Image: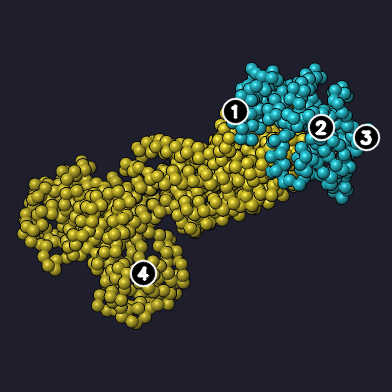
Chain colours: A cyan, B yellow
Amino acid sequence: MSDNLVVRPIVQATALTKQVSTGDEQLTILENINLEVNAGDSVAVVGASGSGKSTLLGLLAGLDTPSSGKVHLDGEDIFLLDEDARAALRGRILGFVFQSFQLLPALTAIENVMLPLELAGISNATTAALELLERVGLGTRLKHYPRQLSGGEQQRVAIARAFVTQPQLLLADEPTGNLDSTTGAQIIELMFELNRERGTTLVLVTHDEAISSRCAWRIRLAGGKVVN
Amino acid sequence: MNIFKLSFRMLRRDWRAGELRVLAFALVIAVGGMTTVGFFADRVQLALSRQGNQLLGADLIIFSDHTLPSQYAEQAKRQRLAISTALKFPSMAAKGDNSLLTEIKAVTAGYPLRGELRISEDFGDTSPRTTRIANAIPAPGSAWVDEKLMIQLALSRGDTIEVGTAHFIVTALITQEPDYSIGFINLRPRVLINTVDLPATGLVQQGSRIGYRLLVSGDSGEVENFRKWAQSRLTLGERIEGIRDARPEIKAALERAEKFLSLAALASVVLAAAAAALAVRRFTQRHLDGCAVMRCLGASQATMLRLYMYHFATLGLIASGAGCLLGFVAQGALAFWLSGLVEAELPWPSVWPAVHGLLTGLVLLLGFALPPLLNLRSVPALRVLRRDIGMSNTHSLTGYALGLAALSVLFLWKAGDVRLGASVMGGFAAAIAVFGLLGFLLVKALSHMRGQTGGALRYGLASIRRRATASVVQAVALGLGLMALLALTLIRDDLLQNWRTSLPPDAPDHFLVNIQADQLEPLAAFFNQHKIAQPPVFPMVRGRLTAVNDKPIASGDYNDIRAKRLVEREFNLSWAQEMPSDNQIIKGHWWKSGDSGKAVMSMEEGIAKTVGVGLGDKLTYDVAGSTFSATITSLRKVDWDTFRVNFFVVTPPGVLEKYPATYITSFHLPPKQMDVTNQLIKAFPNLLVIDVATIINQVHKVIEQVSKAVEFVFLFTLLAGLAVLYAAIASTQDERIHEAAIFRTLGAKRWQLARAWAAEFAILGGLAGLFAAAGASALGYVIGEYALNLTYTFNPSIWLTGVLSGMIGVTAAGLMGTRSALSTPPLITLRNI
Ligand SMILES: Nc1ncnc2c1ncn2[C@@H]1O[C@H](COP(=O)(O)OP(=O)(O)OP(=O)(O)O)[C@@H](O)[C@H]1O
Ligand SMILES: [Mg+2]
């Protein structure tokens, strides 16, 4: 844990630009984004719909490739790696929470939480998964399928799945977007608690000013550019 | 944890969650249907040949004109085959002063090995006689005689007859003899005795004309081995025959039935393929999200590929295994059910159908699952953020090509007949291409019609357009399935029709041979008197082939045993103005009315080939001491399936009339009028009456059973067709559930939605039916014409049947399948999206 004491960026984006061509037109979604998030920090990415928040998050996670610019994750220049190596890196240091939960419908709650450990080849997946599900308050719903859980409960499972690998960085794309405000508040609460407990770095995309104000930093996007 | 364990775990989870139901069901039914057909066809084929063998009295017979070397019997014993011997020779049999030339047959215990010998103890004119199966052969010192001898020597039970230097007590009347039918040469009255009495007759000597036979029967594989073994050891004067060599009509019926059964099995493979392709498609669609998530969670492409490969391989093994089991159970039930119909006990099937089934299941699943899998592993992880990102389709076309290639290999293997397999496979490959293209164009065209229609139809069209790819895939798969079924129906109908017409219930079952010219009129009067329709009478002149193109020939010129025999024997030559209706000219032309008296002839193609002559060759015959020459101007195909009188060589009128001719005719005698033969024999003692009613009955039985088997097997292919339907409906089920929720939230009533879907299904089914009818007509024609040698009858109703059955079947199944989608409250559905 001594690493965490040294302040160094866990995510670093340099001159990140993303363009897509739609027909004969070049559309710039992100333009020259520079940012640094230090370990243990929490950052909110805010902005109007269509401002490029999800695109940025996808690039930071190496889910997509930029038109130009670099992303360093834990000191590694991820776009020098191939997709498989990036996937391995993600498995090692990243956790995800999505707006639409993205639980596998054929897997029960506990199996969904176990999945990242199983994919990483870690053996006592059950114990770790059990512990986290209890932590998020779903210790009694282990064998339930996603469709038998409410949206809030599903998102809790997703949070448990994100934290089960003990990631250094948690990326969340509007984790409360599909939930009512009370449930959303509970979910956010849970995320910040876990974040504190485990010293995870958090990058959170949100529309919600109240939520963003809880983060240490705030990055505002407008038309694909950072405005502050 | 290793990938294999994880994949097994995922398989279990998917199974438990019901994700694999469609795929597994499709696979189990498909493999089950196929193995049922395979197992059953296997058993029926064995049973049918055995049934046929009853006519031969054995599975195989070695004929010889000299004492057979002991090696054959020894080898047969080594192979644990049952054997029995029979000796035949002509000899006078006498009762008091009356004597008659008869055919003596001496047999050993066990005779006949197949079929039954029926005898009666009722002598005299009584009819009907009580008959029973002879469980043994005549005891030493006794003889069994046939009706002809009984009548002509006025024998009654206990009389003594004299054969050579031995005396026999007549103890029974032979009413049915299995091998009576082998060739129509056995025209003489018959006497059956025990071999131990042979020496006493003093008739078996050097130079006597004796035919020796070794009858062999047993396990079909062993019999076949024995045949191969013996074939290479035959010397001059020896030949080996199975039922197929002996009875062309049975051979034809059996071979067609076998081909049909293997076609049915092939059709079920095609159906299985269509079902598997559809189900795999659905599976991968449903797993897109999961894959993206796993990629997010750090799984590499290789991991994903292996995960799903193992997943599918395991699933394939389990489902195919279950399918095989199902097939085995189903065929057992089928066999049990059929046991009343098939007289012969059904032999056990071989393991090959199971191996076929297992392999087919795996090849199908992997062949069709691999391409989507290759795509699945490269699902962009970004999909977790943007749902609209699907998977690339780069592998789908090449992948289906792979599946098809694998399928083709299976096909050729299963068909066991390259031409049949290739034509079916080629047909289906072409069909997929054409259907796919047409489907695509039609879907496009249909969606333009949207403006002109209203209500449900409009929504149906809209849905089809929205799901364009899925719709085309569904239509093609359904079309293929229906095409396989329709083609099979067509061929089945042709087959059954062909059998029915070749042997109608009133097919001639009695032949009259050796009619003299001056007997024609009294004979016609006799028929009139007994109210029997006047049968056509054919002249017949016997001649021996002596020269081809003026070059003398001898049997030594030929290596082929059949050719040797043909050259040694006398041909029956006949003349006619019109060609018999069941003949067909293969080459050359039949003569016109003005050609009377020309020295030309028409020859049966098979015999021309054997003798090695063709169009334009001049053949010279020795007819009653003088020579007769004629040139071949046509070759004919003769349908030997029928029992009509047919000649190898026919000339125009005015050529053969100057030679001594006898006449031959055939007629049908209803069972009630059986005593007419006795009166016929009394009235025309020189006539030979050949009663083939028993053979025809046997052939009828064989054909009836083959037809039944064909029908039953067909039923099972239908089951595989259901699997396709199920998979096709299930393939868009998810979308439909989603759609239903949205529509109903927007206020659509259930029946409105149901009607829109019904319209969509009806259009899909109609399209599939249209494809199927077109494909089946083409395929039916090709297969019928080239593989089964059936004359294909164009069937316009197939279009109506195809389109209607497609529409009704798909709509009914579709609505049944989507009932749950309609009745799920929208909230539940929406919550799950
Ligand atoms: N592959 C693409 N092709 C075309 N346009 C794209 C593509 N990806 C993103 N965009 C566009 O880029 C813009 C930013 O998209 P993005 O999803 O990042 O927005 P967002 O800020 O996450 O919006 P929201 O708050 O609605 O989720 C949008 O206008 C989107 O339509
Ligand atoms: Mg977004």
Q: Which residue is mark 4?
A: B610
Q: Quadrant of the C terminus of chain B?
A: top right
Query: Which residue occupies the foreground of this view, B658 or A159?
Result: A159
- Disc 3 and disc 2 on one polypeptide chain: yes
**B538 lies above or below B734:** below
- At mark 1, the secondary structure is loop
Task: Tell me: is circle 2 under 8 Å from ligand 1.
Answer: no
Q: Marks 3 and 2, Cα distance to the nearest angstrom? A: 25 Å
Query: Which residue occupies the foreground of this view, B18 or A85?
Result: A85
Chain assignment, label 4: B
Q: Marks 1 and 4, Cα distance to the nearest angstrom? A: 80 Å
Residue B365 in the image, given as x and y percentages of width and height:
56, 43
Pair 2/4: label in front: 2
Pair 4/3: label in front: 3
Marks 4,3: beta carbons within 8 A: no
- At mark 4, the secondary structure is helix
Tell me which amino acid carries mark 3: Val
Q: Marks 2 and 1, Cα distance to the nearest angstrom? A: 32 Å
Residue A7 is marked as 2
Q: Marks 2 and 4, Cα distance to the nearest angstrom? A: 99 Å
Q: Relative to B789, is B86 on the left or the right? A: left
Q: Marks 1 and 3, Cα distance to the nearest angstrom? A: 46 Å
User: Which of pointers 2 and 1 lies earlier in the amino acid sequence?
Assistant: 2
**B321 lies above or below B398:** above
User: Which of pointers 1 and 3 lies earlier in the amino acid sequence?
Assistant: 1
Query: Which residue occupies the foreground of this view, A159 or B400?
Result: A159
Q: Which residue is mark 1?
A: A124
Q: Which residue is mark 3?
A: A227
